[in-house]
Amino acid sequence: MKPIMKFRANLNGQNYLEMAHESFCKIEDHRALSEIPLSDFLMSALAIFKLKMSTLLELDKHRKMDKVRAQNIKKVFKVKERIPSDTHLRDVIDQIPYYLLRDPFKKIFNLLHREKVLAQFKYSIPGIQDSLLTSMDGTGHFHSTKVNCEHCLIKKAKNKDEEDEIQFHHQMLGAAIVNPNKKTVIPFAPEPIFNDGGHFDKNDCENKAAKRMLWWIKDEHPGLPFVILGDALYGNRPMLKEIKKKGWHCILGIKPGTQKILFEQLNDQKGVQVITHSDEIGEKVKKKRVRTYKYLNGAYFSEDSIARINILDFTETIEWENKKGHQKNQTHFTWMTTIDIEKDNIYQIMKAGRSRWKQENEVFNTLKNQGYNFEHNYGHGKKYLSTNLAIIMHLAFLMDQLEETFCEVFQKARESNRTKLNLWSSMQYCFDFVFCNSWQQFLLVLTAKNAGIKAEFYLDNTG
């Protein structure tokens, strides 16, 4: 009997796990005595997020009581000695410098480059070479009024009694390759936004984290062309200077309150070009859509500034009639960009600028609401635990994104479940009852189960 389906040799979850294991094995062990290899701790943590376990205690429970799952974790996730307890796992991962966990992301990105996957994500904007749109945004993943560490950000807020209350929190800067025409995103390793060594007098911020991230992205991927996308928080001269240093382009949001001089030039009408386009959209309900583009090339930041930037102001108005009467919806964006704006590329620049939201919606929203439990406190630690677990969660998400797009076996398993939450539930069920030797074999078993095929028969005929 022939196998039910085939999967690409390199773009599959098993290969990603092996690359992660290889990277984790190269990290120098900080412990003097180590009965359990450091890679076992990191791969066990990766298993938690690949299987969407809600707590570390769930891993500990199966380590002690569930023979099938314990053996599957050891086999599939290459845990050589034994699965560590939740306490031991927290203590060890807490001491690993977070930047050492970037290597699996780098290996996977290099694989995607060799397999021509990144070429599929390049976006064409007339006037520049086809580039990779990279959206950046920050979010929080831990907060407390009591638990803290030397890396916590702090802020003071009024409590119910109108007294100053110190709040401790961790934030993280995420970045992902996006394309307006693709749902899939490819996330980079996130960059933590946190204080260094407990210096609470001045917090770290998104812009500082962004500069660090831009530096190591350029260092790890020197030959790739990027267009950096960001909201108005990044729309400033220092960020523009950093991006230009890397030889990249950018499309960054701006607001009147922070870039008053740029908006004065845009409203002055001198040199400003205006293009309006109207069309009809909708099938059942016909809607009139009007798009207005205003743009200015060569704007200056200040009267004595030699730096120049281009501005694109975009307004979209959609009007229609329904039972409630006349309806109207309007959206408005303003960006500054290093790309010279012309009639032939305003549409592509607008589409690229609007795809910035994919970092929030496709990455952070998925991590928070679709089974990854991003805002759940798996452990805070004294140094890097909270940050490291968030990075490993991003690694699991990266693997899932690539499997969902390029792995036939994963796609079949996904199709047989109505939602991702159902898929994660099916995964946990199968992992508990069927012995598997690899992640790919596990997906085959999962697909067979959903197709109503006995797993034993299926494995016998597929190897």
Image (tube, rainbow, N blue to C red):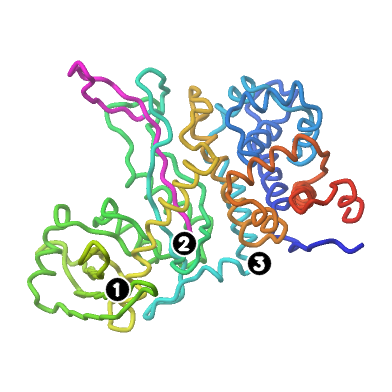
Q: Position of residue 168 (x, y in %)?
A: 35, 25
Res. 314 visible in picture:
no
Q: Nearer the viewer, residue 138 or 53?
A: 53
Q: Position of residue 111 (x, y in %)?
A: 65, 60
User: Which element is circle 1 on?
Assistant: strand
Q: Is residue 230 left or right of residue 432?
A: left
User: Which element is circle 2 on?
Assistant: strand
Residue at point 38%, 56% (across, down): 357
Of circles 3 and 1, the one toward us is 1
- Judged by its main secondary structure, the magenta piece is strand
Pointer 3 and pointer 2: residues touching (CB < 8 Å)? no
Label 1 Cα neighbours within 10 Å, binned few <14 / some 14-19 / many ≥20: some
Q: Amino acid at mark 2?
A: Val
How far apart marks 2 and 1 lie (CA) works out to 28 Å
Pointer 3 and pointer 1: residues touching (CB < 8 Å)? no
Upstream in the sequence, badge 2 or badge 1? Answer: 2
Upstream in the sequence, badge 3 or badge 2? Answer: 3
Residue at point 38%, 23% (across, down): 144
Q: Which residues are magenta?
A: 153-177
Q: Position of residue 202 (x, y in %)?
A: 28, 32
The N terminus lies in quadrant: bottom right
Image vertical order of residue 310 relative to residue 277, above or below:
above
Q: Amino acid at mark 3?
A: Glu
Question: What's the mark number on residue 115?
Answer: 3
How far apart marks 3 and 1 lie (CA) works out to 42 Å
How far apart marks 3 and 2 lie (CA) works out to 18 Å
User: Which element is circle 3 on?
Assistant: loop
Q: Is residue 227 left or right of residue 409?
A: left
Q: Write down the residue under mark 1.
A: 287
Q: Write down the residue under mark 2.
A: 178
Q: Amino acid at mark 1?
A: Lys
